[in-house]
Image (tube, rainbow, N blue to C red):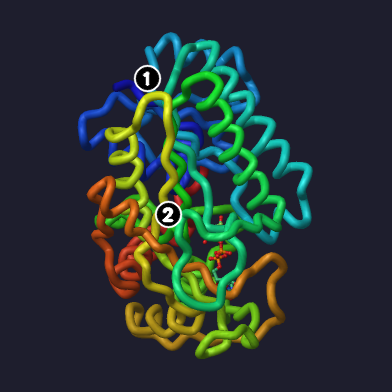
């Protein structure tokens, strides 16, 4: 099954591409390299192109006889999206529509779409199920929710088969320490925390200590990037034709910001200095995944069950690559 992965040179995309390659798939990354890294996958698997270029997408899909698309390409920061909604709506919505049009022209009938836990309405306890109330209140979340709807509408009208995967907090790195997280600017908690023991920053800021949680800091469900990748492979293999499914991907366990910092101290053996800062725009108290549906229907289970192992893998990557992948 030839597969095209938009954003396939990005953090989650490249992990999924490497996972599919290891399973013998004929998979290609389609990536502008604005955010992606050419070093994150074999050179012969990378097609450099813009998501906005419909003709190129159609050509690539026809030339490579693509059977399914995995759509990773997107801007991903909740906070940034509140400051730059135009760019978020343009890149995430307009360009996704271009992709769907290209798929229609090239007669590609399957898509796996990277959505987000940010579409849900806030909770203060328990876990989010796929049918929990939604409130996509940042431009980022709204852009993802809009594409979920577009895909479902295309499915009903044009017979598209789809799987929507709502990610919780992607993190960690490949076990050999070769591939990992490298965003510019980096906004994610784990890589920023690890910059302190790496000597790249003096302390980590904690965005809010007054949330209604046991220690007052936000709770997230940290899911290893290779476990996300494995869910994509399973989604592709089980994809119904002409219909769709939605799954949360998370471990089902939440960790506070303070727990992440303490665990990073254990992993690195170093004290990590902290500073209390005001709440960050767009943050929500608690995001924990109910992932029973994914486990039951696709036979998925996370390989990385605990935060220590996840942070250990991230630490191996960041220690080996203090400046990330380097120049593209
Ligand atoms: N945090 C800090 N200090 C920092 C960075 C983060 O305290 O320097 C806190 C945040 O306030 C939040 C938690 O750490 O409470 C996690 O923040 P991240 O930036 O690592 O991740 P987010 O939860 O904001 O967002 C990520 C992805 C989104 C996705 C979401 C889904 O970036 O695309 O997970 O759970 F929607």
Residue 120 seen in render: yes
Question: Which residue position holds label 2?
Answer: 248
Question: For the residue labelled by badge 2, is the local secondary structure a helix, a strand or a loop?
Answer: strand
Question: Which residue position holds label 1?
Answer: 67
Q: Residue at x 45, y 69 (%)?
A: 127
Q: Which corner quadrant of the image does residue 25 belong to?
A: top left
Q: Residue at x 37, y 54 (%)?
A: 225
Q: Which corner quadrant of the image does residue 151 belong to?
A: top right
In the depicted structure, whether residue 39 falls above or below residue 286: above
In the depicted structure, whether residue 288 falls above or below residue 133: below
Q: Picture coordinates of residue 202 (x, y %)?
A: 57, 80
Q: Is mark 1 within 8 Å of ligand 1?
A: no
Q: Nearer the viewer, residue 153 or 98?
A: 153
Q: Picture coordinates of residue 283 (x, y %)?
A: 64, 69
Of circles 2 and 1, which is in front?
A: 2
Q: Picture coordinates of residue 95 (x, y %)?
A: 64, 30
């Amino acid at each position: 099954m030839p597969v095209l992965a938009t954003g396939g040179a990005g953090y989650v995309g490249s992990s999924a591409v490497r996972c599919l390659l290891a399973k013998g798939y004929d998979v290609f990354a389609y990536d502008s390299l604005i955010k992606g890294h050419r070093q994150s996958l074999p050179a012969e698997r990378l097609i450099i192109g813009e998501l906005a270029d419909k003709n190129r997408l159609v050509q690539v899909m026809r030339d490579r006889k693509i059977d399914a698309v995995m759509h990773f390409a997107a801007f991903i920061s909740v906070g940034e999206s509140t400051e730059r909604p135009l760019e978020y709506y343009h890149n995430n919505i307009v360009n996704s529509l271009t992709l769907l049009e290209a798929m229609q022209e090239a007669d590609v009938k399957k898509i796996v779409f990277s959505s987000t836990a940010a579409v849900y309405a806030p909770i203060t306890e328990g876990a989010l199920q796929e049918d929990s109330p939604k409130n996509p209140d940042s431009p980022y979340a709204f852009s993802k929710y809009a594409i979920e709807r577009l895909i479902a509408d295309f499915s009903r009208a044009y017979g598209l088969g789809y799987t929507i995967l709502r990610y919780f907090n992607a993190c960690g790195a490949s076990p050999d320490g070769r591939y990992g997280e490298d965003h510019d600017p980096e906004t994610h908690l784990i890589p920023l925390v690890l910059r302190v023991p790496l000597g790249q920053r003096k302390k980590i800021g904690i965005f809010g200590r007054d949330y209604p949680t046991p220690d007052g800091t936000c709770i997230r469900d940290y899911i290893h990037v290779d476990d996300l990748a494995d869910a994509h492979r399973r989604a592709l293999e089980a994809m119904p034709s002409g219909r769709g499914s939605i799954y949360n991907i998370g471990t089902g366990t939440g960790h506070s910001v303070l727990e992440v910092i303490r665990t990073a101290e254990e992993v690195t053996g170093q004290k990590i200095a902290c500073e209390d800062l005001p709440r960050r725009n767009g943050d929500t108290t608690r995001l924990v995944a109910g992932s029973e549906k994914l486990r039951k229907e696709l036979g998925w289970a996370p390989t990385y069950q605990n935060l220590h192992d996840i942070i250990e893998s991230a630490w191996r990557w960041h220690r080996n690559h203090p400046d990330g992948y380097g120049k593209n």
